[in-house]
């Protein structure tokens, strides 16, 4: 690249100074024009509509928050009431549990006694789960033998 002469450097400097001054003037005019538009818009009906809509939205949010807080307060009151009801009912429930336990024990005692009496009447089959484990009484053994002999005679006749 060729080296610039002092005259070229001076010419470039003068040219850039004009360019920079013109740019800054245009930039300042642009900023001023934008600021004027923004000022007009903020004073206009659209900005008022935004403010009104924002106020309505904030009022709606506040109403919703108030309603939700009222519901939350009701929930808290109901939860406290549930705890109180639980405590109020605890003593009668515990008394009823004791009565149930006493009644159950009496029923169980009677059931065991009566079932033991029945088992005593039938000791050969009490607690026997299948015929192969049954200790056959003598009278049944005698009838079985008689039936087998009668079947053999009938088969040979």
Image (spheres, rainbow, N blue to C red):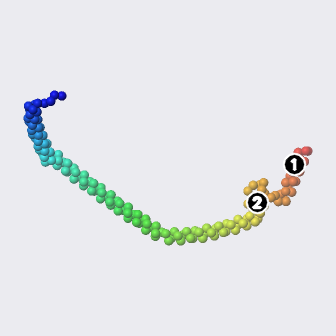
Find numbered disc 2 in the image and state the secondary structure of the residue it sits on: loop
Coordinates of residue 97 in the picture (x, y in percent)? 55, 68
Q: 10 Å neighbourhood of mark 1: few (<14), some, or many (≥20)?
A: few
Find numbered disc 1 in the image and state the secondary structure of the residue it sits on: helix
Instruction: Give the residue drawn at x 15%, y 47%.
Output: 42
* Placement of 91 over or under 25, stated as above or below: below
| Camera-side mark, 1 or 2 | 2
| Residue 153 vs residue 122, the one in the foreground | 122
Residue found farthest to the top:
2
1 or 2: tag closer to the N-terminus: 2
Identify the image quadrant of the C terminus: top right
Residue 129, label in figure: none
Instruction: Give the residue drawn at x 75%, y 61%.
Output: 126
Which residue matches tag 2? 125
Residue found farthest to the right:
157
Does residue 126 appear to the left or right of 75 in the view shown? right
Does residue 10 appear to the left or right of 104 in the view shown? left
Instruction: Give the residue drawn at x 46%, y 70%.
Output: 88
| Residue 133 vs residue 37, the one in the foreground | 37
| Residue 29 vs residue 21, the one in the foreground | 21
Q: Quadrant of residue 80?
A: bottom left
Identify the image quadrant of the N terminus: top left
Does residue 41 appear to the left or right of 96 in the view shown? left
Does residue 133 appear to the left or right of 36 in the view shown? right
Q: Quadrant of residue 64?
A: bottom left
Which residue matches tag 1? 151
The answer to the question of whether label 1 and label 2 lie on touching residues, with beta carbons closer than 8 A, is no
Instruction: Give the residue drawn at x 13%, y 46%.
Output: 39
* Placement of 32 over or under 108, stated as above or below: above
């Amino acid at each position: 690249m060729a080296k610039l002469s002092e005259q070229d450097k001076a010419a470039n400097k003068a040219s850039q100074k004009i360019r920079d001054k013109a740019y800054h003037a245009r930039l300042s005019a642009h900023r001023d024009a934008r600021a004027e538009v923004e000022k007009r818009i903020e004073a206009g009906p659209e900005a008022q509509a935004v403010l009104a809509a924002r106020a309505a939205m904030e009022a709606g949010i506040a109403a919703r928050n108030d309603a939700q807080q009222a519901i939350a307060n009701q929930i808290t009151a109901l939860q406290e009431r549930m705890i109180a009801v639980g405590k109020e009912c605890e003593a009668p429930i515990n008394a009823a549990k004791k009565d149930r336990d006493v009644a159950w024990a009496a029923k169980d005692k009677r059931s065991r006694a009566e079932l033991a009496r029945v088992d005593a009447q039938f000791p050969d089959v009490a607690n026997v789960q299948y015929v192969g484990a049954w200790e056959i009484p003598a009278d049944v053994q005698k009838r079985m033998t008689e039936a087998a002999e009668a079947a053999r005679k009938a088969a040979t006749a």
